[in-house]
Image (cartoon, rainbow, N blue to C red):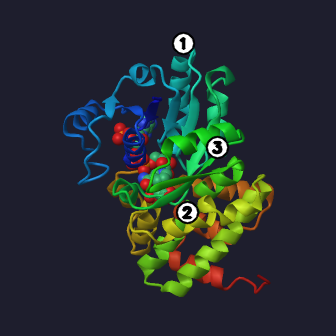
Amino acid sequence: MSKVAVIGAGSWGSVLANILVMNGHKVYIWSRRKEQVDELNKQHTNRHYLANFTYDKRLVASVELEKVLDDATMVLFAIPTKAMRTVTADVASILNAKGLKPTIVHASKGLELGTHKRISEIIGEEIAEENREGIVALSGPSHAEEVAKRDITLVTAASTELKSAKNVQRMFMNNYFRVYTNTDIIGVELGAAFKNIIALGAGALHGLGYGDDAKAALMTRGLAEIARLGIALGADPMTFIGLSGVGDLIVTCTSVHSRNWRAGDQLGRGEELQNVIENMGMVIEGLSTTKAAYELALQKKIDMPITTAIYQVLYEGKNIKRAISDLMQREGRSE
Ligand SMILES: NC(=O)C1=CN([C@@H]2O[C@H](COP(=O)(O)OP(=O)(O)OC[C@H]3O[C@@H](n4cnc5c(N)ncnc54)[C@H](OP(=O)(O)O)[C@@H]3O)[C@@H](O)[C@H]2O)C=CC1
Ligand SMILES: O=C(CO)COP(=O)(O)O
């Protein structure tokens, strides 16, 4: 039996941990809050993040990172991108002190602000090679609310080391959670991060009352521009038509579960950005990813009109209707 340490007990970390427990693995989950640990261990619930769901009683929660990591053969990070560097550094020093070499998996979707690094790059910088077997990104169209109900979900395990990706595939697969492997971790991580930008836009169109034609147009042209940037950053173009590309774009642009879509919807209805962030109570990754992608597009000289428009709305206070009108009035061009 493998021992898995799950770092982060929000909606996604807790549900992935639950899958692993139900698949027969020993799983410890880390939370920084004692009251959440007590709730998970005693009531087997996590009401703030997932109302009306009861976790498998065998899932053990702890605030002690050392205890969670003890004997771990796999470490799974599911925390917001902005917390990745400091938390991985804490994990790294414990792995080093204990002489552990687990497979490292992450399920987060974003780019680090300032450095524009992908999450596997942050992990690679913080956790020494002698303390990791491989780095795997687990990604695809998957909402915690549906996976918790054992709805059918397909994701991909991406790593430059196929052996590690296959290990993750084996550990997570069951009759409702199907895992593919992929060696293009660049494309998988970029598709996962960038689709959140387009989801903000899709939500905004909904909030403003636009119809299905507008949403389909945004998703299609959005995919074109995020793939353009992804390819410039080293991704395989084919990855953008896979689960972590178009698959995740579809679910995030159409699902009421998506925090990015819901944030966009509220902005479209005229809500102030600060209120949207405060009321969500969960991470909205697309907000910072929009900034990172906008800066990268400028650096790489990639045309990203939708991302630019969303950046202007979020960071420069541009009126959303004006942003849409400006997009529509761009010079006509070939598809
Ligand atoms: N929810 C989903 O369905 C999916 C989410 N993802 C991705 O997974 C990642 C995590 O998302 P999700 O679980 O939904 O997020 P949530 O907002 O639901 O939970 C975030 C978790 O991270 C913890 N956390 C936040 N900041 C810090 C910090 N500075 N240090 C340590 N822990 C911290 C939170 O702790 P606390 O409660 O104490 O604040 C909480 O446990 C994101 O990148 C998201 O895009 C990917 C696929 C599906
Ligand atoms: O990545 C996700 C679905 O695949 C989750 O999206 P949100 O963060 O928008 O909820």
**Position of residue 170 in the picture relative to residue 56 (left or right):** right
Query: Mark 2 — residue?
Result: 248
Q: Nearer the viewer, mark 2 or mark 3?
A: 2
Cα separation, mark 1 vs mark 3, equals 30 Å
**Position of residue 142 in the picture relative to residue 11 (left or right):** right
Answer whether residue 96 is visible to the viewer in this image. yes
Query: Mark 3 — residue?
Result: 114
Which mark sits nearer the N-terminus, 2 or 3? Answer: 3
Q: Amino acid at mark 1?
A: Ala
Residue shown at 64% from the left, 43% from the top:
114
Q: Position of residue 328 (x, y in %)?
A: 64, 84
Which of 156/30 is in front?
Answer: 156
Cα separation, mark 2 vs mark 1, equals 38 Å
- Total marks in image: 3
Q: Position of residue 22 (x, y in %)?
A: 37, 42
Which of 281/270 is in front?
Answer: 281
**SS at circle 2:** helix
**SS at circle 3:** loop
Q: Amino acid at mark 3?
A: Gly
Q: Is mark 2 within 8 Å of ligand 2?
A: yes
Q: Position of residue 86 (x, y in %)?
A: 53, 30
Q: Amino acid at mark 2?
A: Asp
Which mark sits nearer the N-terminus, 1 or 3? Answer: 1
Residue shown at 40% from the left, 45% from the top:
19
Residues marked 1 and 3 touching at CB (< 8 Å): no
Q: Position of residue 125 (x, y in %)?
A: 67, 30
Query: Mark 1 — residue?
Result: 97
Which mark sits nearer the N-terminus, 2 or 1? Answer: 1
